[in-house]
Amino acid sequence: MHTERTTSKLGVIERYRDYLPVTESTPIVSLGEGTTPLVFCPRLSERVGRAVFVKNEGVNPTGSFKDRGMTVAVSKSVERGGKALICASTGNTSASAAAYAARAGISCAVILPAGKIATGKLLQAFAYGAKIVAIDGNFDDALRLVRELGQSGDFAIVNSINPDRITGQKTAAFEIVDDLSDAPDFHLLPVGNAGNITAYWAGYREYHARGCSTKLPVMLGFQAAGAAPIFYNRIVEKPETVASAIRIGNPASWKQARAAITESNGAIDVVSDEEILSAQAWLARHEGIFVEPASAASIAGLFKCCDSKEAAYSKIPAQSRIVCTVTGHGLKDPDVITAQLKELGSVPANVNDVRRAVGH
Ligand code: F0G
């Protein structure tokens, strides 16, 4: 095998090596993840009357934030001699695990709720060569099975119950602080299995403890109204939402998410499917950032906080700097938008007809 540097862009392990559990002898399995754009959004800022930046995690190698954790989890697994990965997933974790397994030359099994995975994500897992198993059950059932299967020692579990995943994902917080030269005042993000809010909070605290920022952000997490166990403080047996990525009724990192919210003086709130889809469309049309429905929960949450008196955290001061993480690319989960797209009739190939069709 040739041993050139893996990509022209540093992956998160190379960029933040000192903060991650790797040594010289850890084989680095990377696809050049991380270093995603922190995009200042002028129209969004105007709409809510505060400075808003979007951390666009949809531009990671497999189109979601999962790649940050997966590079660390898969590298560590290979270092320990692991030859097979397994995960439960609502879609993105499976796409990412499958890609990094392919990159490492090991096998990957993904356990998914049948009929509930967005088209793009299922295609990814298939294309990367994962063994796909659909179960008659939801994500929470799939994760329970994966925990049991993992006990045999035959597989490395690469869900966020694997601490290497959380450790990798905390690098997103480092990048934000590096880009802004300090932590933001508020950080908003979608919450499903609650690994990401746990990871961001760990990252912000660690950077602060090392003197890289002067403050810590208030963490605001948003669940879909039909899948909001943390908000309602009870397990949801049959979670339902159009945002299939966060269709989770019993999050693995529930306690850690609670701690992040309490310690940061933050809050957890809910957004409806309607609010999610309308925020998704708004962000695409006004800022040119196309995200999947689950990702738009952070934008829907921002609108709710800034517009309504009822939101769990409605007092974001006007001079605040806000970061919203959008977690996955819009092309992964195209079904709702596809249904809105009318069939395109064609026009004759001449300037007059085309001009008329354009409407100018
Ligand atoms: N946004 C997207 C696009 C996701 O795929 C997920 C989780 C989340 C937000 C929530 O993150 O679970 O750390 O709170 N997706 C997992 C999966 C569950 O299997 O892909 P979380």
Image: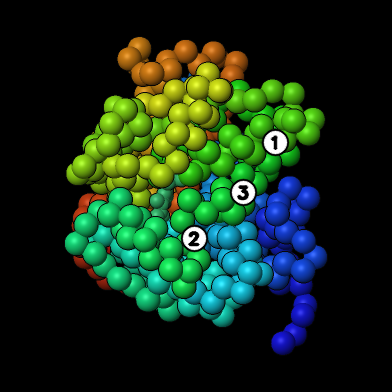
Could you tell me which secondary element the residue under label 1 belongs to?
helix
Q: How far apart are the two marked residues, 1 and 3, measured between alpha carbons? A: 11 Å
Q: Is residue 213 left or right of residue 142?
A: right
Could you tell me which secondary element the residue under label 3 belongs to?
helix
- Residue type for callout 3: Thr
User: What x and y, as percent, mark residue 327?
Assistant: 47, 47
Q: Is residue 165 left or right of residue 243?
A: right
Q: Mark 2 highlights which residue? A: 158
Could you tell me which secondary element the residue under label 2 belongs to?
loop
Q: Which of marks 3 and 1 precedes in the sequence? A: 3
Question: At 37% from the left edge and 42% from the top edge, which residue is drawn?
Answer: 251
Figure disc tally: 3
Q: Is residue 213 above or below residue 68?
A: above
Judge the density around disc 3: few (<14), some (14-19), many (≥20) Cα neighbours within 10 Å.
many
User: What x and y, as percent, mark residue 278?
Assistant: 31, 37
Q: Is residue 82 above or below residue 187?
A: below
Residue 167 image label: 3
Residue at the far front: name it: 152
User: What x and y, as percent, mark residue 115?
Assistant: 22, 61
Residue 233, quarter of the rendered image = top left
Question: At 72% from the left edge and 30% from the top edge, which residue is drawn?
Answer: 208
Q: Which of marks 2 and 3 precedes in the sequence? A: 2
Q: Is residue 81 left or right of residue 258?
A: right
Judge the density around disc 1: few (<14), some (14-19), many (≥20) Cα neighbours within 10 Å.
some
Residue at the far bottom: name it: 1
Q: Which of marks 2 and 1 precedes in the sequence? A: 2
- Residue type for callout 2: Val
User: Is the distance from the Cβ of mark 2 to the nearest ligand 1 atom less than 8 Å?
Assistant: no
On-image quarter of the N terminus = bottom right
User: What x and y, as percent, mark residue 227?
Assistant: 28, 39
Q: Mark 1 highlights which residue? A: 206
Q: Is residue 252 visible?
A: yes
